Structures are given as C-alpha cells and as structure tokens.
Amino acid sequence: VRLIYGARLNNLNGTDFNLYLIDSFDKLGFKIALYGAKKDSIAITYKKLVDKYKNIYYFQDGYSDLNINNLNDKTVLFIGLGTPKQEIWLFDNLDKIISKNIIAITVGGFFDYVSGYQHRAPRIIRKLNLEWMFRLITDPKRNFKKTLRNFMFLPYLIIDFLELNFITKK
C-alpha cells in the first residue's frame, strides 16, 4: 500500500484496508454500493459510512438477491457475504458485473465489524498478527471451518520446507 498509494497502514487486514479503499474510491468520485450481511447490520453500516463518504449511494442485505440493474455503471461494489459464498456469487454474476463496468471487491465480514456486531481483537493481538485466533476463540461456530481451511495446507508446506532444506544441505 505504501509503495502504490504512499500511505502506511499499521495492520493490513481487511477491516483496515477496506476503509482505506472506500475512502480512496470516494475521493476519486466513484459511486459505491454495499451488498451483504444481515438487514440490520448492513443498514447500520450504511448509516455509519454514508455520513463520512458522500458517494455511497446503495446498500442491500445479503439474504436477498442483488439486482445488478439497480446499480449505476462504473460502481465500486463491496460484497460481504462471507467466504466462500461471496466469491461464488461474484463468479456466478461476473458477466453482468463486467457488462456494467463494476469494480467488485469481496470484503468478508467487514460490514459486521463496521456495524458493531463483531468486535476487533485487542491491539496487541492485531500487532502479533493473531486476529484470526481471536476470532476463532470468540466465535468458533462462525470461524472454525474457515480457520481449518486456511491450515489445511500447513502439513504440505512443512514437508516442502523440510525437503528443500534437506536437498540444499547435501
């Protein structure tokens, strides 16, 4: 981010970076739409963000189908349906998104953090890059599968690392 935009973010995770993106797109004059989360969560998110960012013009919860025709051309669409649902939705609607010149960005649970339904980890945990562990401990039902998926490849990485070290030491 620093090399490209000249800005330094202390913790480059989605929660911080998404706010930076919204701010950047707003300053550039792009129209911004929000899609995802539950009705009350996305409504609160919209109310919190629309006061600060003048170009946010549309929001819709993630439990009803988004009619892309409701969006302006050249909109930046933030999609917060959770992983992998948001990526599947994006690929299923890619032709419509491309035809309207929409920039689509998946944001996971970002709307739940902005609305206050989910809480950030304490600063020390964020600085240690252990926010994923905080989320797993505080909300295992929501985060267990996601964490398990992320660590599914760990044994392969360890084996590759050990094999590489063994080969280079000969």
Image (cartoon, rainbow, N blue to C red):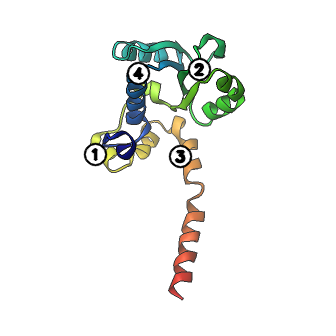
User: Element under label 4?
Assistant: helix
**Marks 4 and 2: which is nearer the front?**
4
Q: Which residue is mark 2?
A: 62
Q: Which residue is mark 1?
A: 124
Q: Which residue is mark 4?
A: 26
Mark 1 residue type: Ile
Does 20 sit left or right of 66 as displayed?
left
Looking at the rendered image, the quarter that the C terminus falls into is bottom right
User: Element under label 2?
Assistant: loop
Q: Residues within 10 Å of mark 1 (few under 14, many from 20)?
A: few
Question: Does label 3 or label 2 sit earlier along the sequence?
Answer: 2
Relative image position of residue 37 (x, y in whole percent): 53, 22
Q: Identify which residue is drawn at 52% across, 39% down.
A: 143
User: Marks 3/2: CA distance?
Assistant: 22 Å
Looking at the image, is 51 positioned above or below residue 119? above
Relative image position of residue 10 (x, y in whole percent): 30, 43
Question: Does label 4 or label 2 sit earlier along the sequence?
Answer: 4
Residue 36 is at least partly visible in this image: no
User: Marks 1/2: CA distance?
Assistant: 32 Å
**Marks 4 and 3: which is nearer the front?**
4
